[in-house]
Image: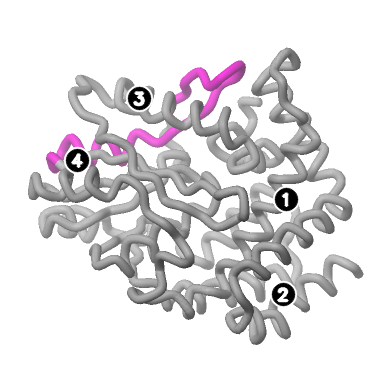
């Protein structure tokens, strides 16, 4: 009952009033909502804490319950940000998402072969789309069709999503249509992905996405699986591989960090390992941005935990 009321509040009254609120209040609300989520979703929080403890090791100086709490806060803030997509534009995007490493991205595009912006489901990875699109870059995002995303959620949660969850996905789909991005859906032809690289555009792909063909690599104390497809596409087209991560500042506002290109690799496995090493370092610094994936049977950890 409580969860249903919270979802209703998120989708009906909050949808209307949230874009009218100052950003500082929005993130304070997100942190408070994260506390509530942590208290209600105890099973989820315990799985996150236990999963990260197993991944990092007992000897590491982490407060694992605090990691789970901040993970819940990050999740709620990310959900609230969906309702702000229509408010973002080229004139105010700096207030919503700051950008670090822009010169790196510009240098990669200067090569003229397109850029594969390699990311993970880290923090609110969706914010890279408005962060770059509203700054004048042409962005294409590879991902699941919204209908397939609901089915994937069912597989991950091992239960049928309720009507409110489905309606929230529909609302997110409506909000995402306001983003300055072209979506390329998995399961369809990947020709648009090749074509956009030929036009020297940005193609954003998550390396920890959903696919049957995965590469298993060591990750901290466990193992993880990543997609070889984006690396293979880069090698076939000559596109530059540029890693990107979305992290939150102390006040909750996000920043998109562009890392140096992954170059000089002789194999798909070596390139995957380079990105994986970067992701490990971000995981150590911001575990609450990624630990939620340890609670589900989903990539990159899934049954490999």
- Front one among 251 and 11: 251
Residue designated by label 3:
274
Return the x and y of residue 65 as percentages of the image width and height.
80, 35
Residue designated by label 2:
10
- Front one among 97 and 273: 97
Q: Tell me the CA gap for discs 4 and 3.
A: 14 Å
Q: In this view, does 116 lie to the left or right of 112?
A: right
Residue designated by label 1:
72
**Which region is colored magenta?**
215-238
Secondary structure under tag 2 reads helix
Up-down relation of residue 267 to residue 241 (above or below): above
Q: Tell me the CA gap for discs 4 and 2.
A: 39 Å
Q: In this view, does 170 lie to the left or right of 227?
A: right
- Front one among 116 and 267: 116
Quarter occupied by residue 291: top right
Up-down relation of residue 241 to residue 171 (above or below): above
Quarter occupied by residue 202: bottom left
- Front one among 9 and 21: 21
Up-down relation of residue 12 to residue 242 (above or below): below
Task: Mark 4 or mark 2: name the one nearer the start of the chain.
Answer: 2
Q: Does the segment drawn in magenta span residue 211?
A: no
Return the x and y of residue 262 as percentages of the image width and height.
26, 31
Task: Mark 2 or mark 3: name the one nearer the start of the chain.
Answer: 2
- Residue contact between numbered discs 4 and 3, judged by CB atoms under 8 Å: no
Classify 10 Å Cα crowding around label 1: few (below 14), some (14-19), many (20 and above): many
């Amino acid at each position: 009952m409580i969860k249903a009321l919270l979802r209703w509040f998120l989708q009906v009254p909050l949808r209307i009033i949230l874009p009218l609120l100052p950003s500082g209040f929005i993130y304070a609300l997100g942190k408070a909502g994260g506390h509530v989520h942590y208290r209600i979703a105890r099973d989820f929080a315990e799985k996150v804490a236990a999963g990260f403890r197993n991944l990092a090791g007992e000897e590491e100086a982490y407060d694992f319950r605090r990691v789970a709490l901040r993970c819940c806060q990050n999740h709620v803030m990310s959900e609230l940000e969906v309702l702000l997509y229509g408010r973002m534009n080229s004139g105010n995007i700096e207030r919503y998402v700051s950008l670090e490493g822009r010169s790196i991205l510009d240098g990669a595009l200067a090569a003229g072969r397109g850029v594969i912006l390699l990311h993970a489901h880290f923090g609110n990875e969706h914010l890279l789309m408005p962060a770059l699109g509203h700054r004048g870059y042409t962005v294409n995002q590879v991902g699941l069709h919204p209908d397939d995303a609901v089915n994937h959620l069912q597989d991950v949660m091992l239960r049928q999503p309720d009507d409110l969850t489905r309606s929230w996905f529909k609302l997110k789909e409506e909000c995402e249509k306001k983003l300055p991005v072209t979506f390329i859906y998995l399961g369809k032809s990947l020709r648009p992905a090749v074509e956009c690289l030929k036009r020297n555009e940005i193609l954003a792909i998550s390396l920890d996405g959903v696919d049957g063909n995965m590469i298993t690599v060591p990750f901290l104390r466990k193992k993880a699986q990543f997609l070889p497809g984006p690396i293979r596409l880069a090698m076939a087209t000559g596109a530059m591989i540029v890693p990107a991560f979305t992290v939150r500042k102390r006040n909750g506002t996000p920043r998109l960090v562009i890392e140096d290109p992954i170059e000089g690799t002789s194999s798909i496995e070596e390139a995957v390992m380079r990105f994986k090493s970067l992701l490990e370092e971000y995981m150590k610094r911001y575990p609450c941005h990624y630990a939620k994936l340890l609670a589900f049977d989903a990539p990159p950890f899934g049954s490999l935990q």
